[in-house]
Structure formats: structure tokens, C-alpha cells
Amino acid sequence: MNGYRKLGVKTAHRQSMLRNLVTDLFRYGRIQTTDCRAKEARREAEKMITLAKKGDLHARRQALAYIKDEDVVSKLFDEIAPKYEERHGGYTRILKLGPRQGDVAEAVFLELV
């Protein structure tokens, strides 16, 4: 069994899609997507917040290697990470919305706690 979901796309597409989901989550604080994509994006988002809590230059460069938008990385380190200083994991929540109209995929909100 793999340690991740393949999401029905090739590797480069999947990695790019997850990067975009995580970037938008930090930019807007909440995104709507499917259940499987949200669960995979949550794994990466939690790693990025944990990295941002360290707050040093090496952690910032590691975050920039994953999130390509410098403004979002600055927001992550300056605004988002300090909110979770006392919390050990569990920075995001998934709220189920029910089946999506077009393809009946399970739609959810992925949001920062």
C-alpha cells in the first residue's frame, strides 16, 4: 500500500495540484475541493506550518522550495505560524459539504483552525 493517494493523475500533475491547493489554503484560509484531495493537501499543509513554526532561514527556504509564491510564504511565517505556537499538530479541519452536483464527488471545505 502506498503512503499517499495517486488521485488519478500523473506524478508531476499531482505534485503541482497539491502545491496549488496548499498555496491557496494559506492565501485564503479556506478552500473547497474533494475529500481525497483535501486529505492529501492537509498532510502537506501541516508540514509547512510545522516548518514555519521553526522560523529560521533554513525553514523559510524549505518552504519556498514547496510554495513558489513569496507573499504566501511571508504570510505563513509572519501571521499563520505564530497563531499555532502552542498547538502540536491539527492545524486544519475538513468540513463535509455533501456530494457535488456535477459528478457526485464528496465536496469538502479544507480550512485553517
Image (cartoon, rainbow, N blue to C red):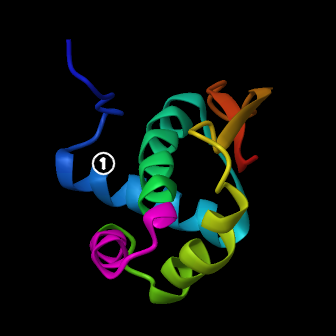
Residue 92 image position (x, y, % from top left): 65, 43
Q: Which residues are magenta?
A: 52-65
53 sits to left or right of 25: left
51 or 109: nearer the viewer? 51
Asked which quadrant contains residue 70, the reply is: bottom left
Residue 67 x %, y % = 39, 71
Whether 97 is drawn above or below 55: the answer is: above
Mark 1: secondary structure = helix
Camera-nearest residue between 93 and 98: 93
* Magenta-colored stretch includes residue 64: yes
Q: How many C-alpha atoms fall within 10 Å of the one at disc 1: few (<14), some, or many (≥20)?
A: some
Left or right: 39, with 75 as reference point: left
Asked if 93 appears above or below 105 in the picture, the reply is below
**Quarter of the image where one finds residue 16:** bottom left
Q: Quadrant of the N terminus?
A: top left
Left or right of 33? Residue 109 is: right
Tell me what residue is drawn at x 47 percent, y 53 percent.
Answer: 50
Disc 1 marks a residue whose amino acid type is Arg
Where does the image place residue 103, in percent across and percent down from the top left?
Answer: 62, 30
Q: Which residue is mark 1?
A: 14
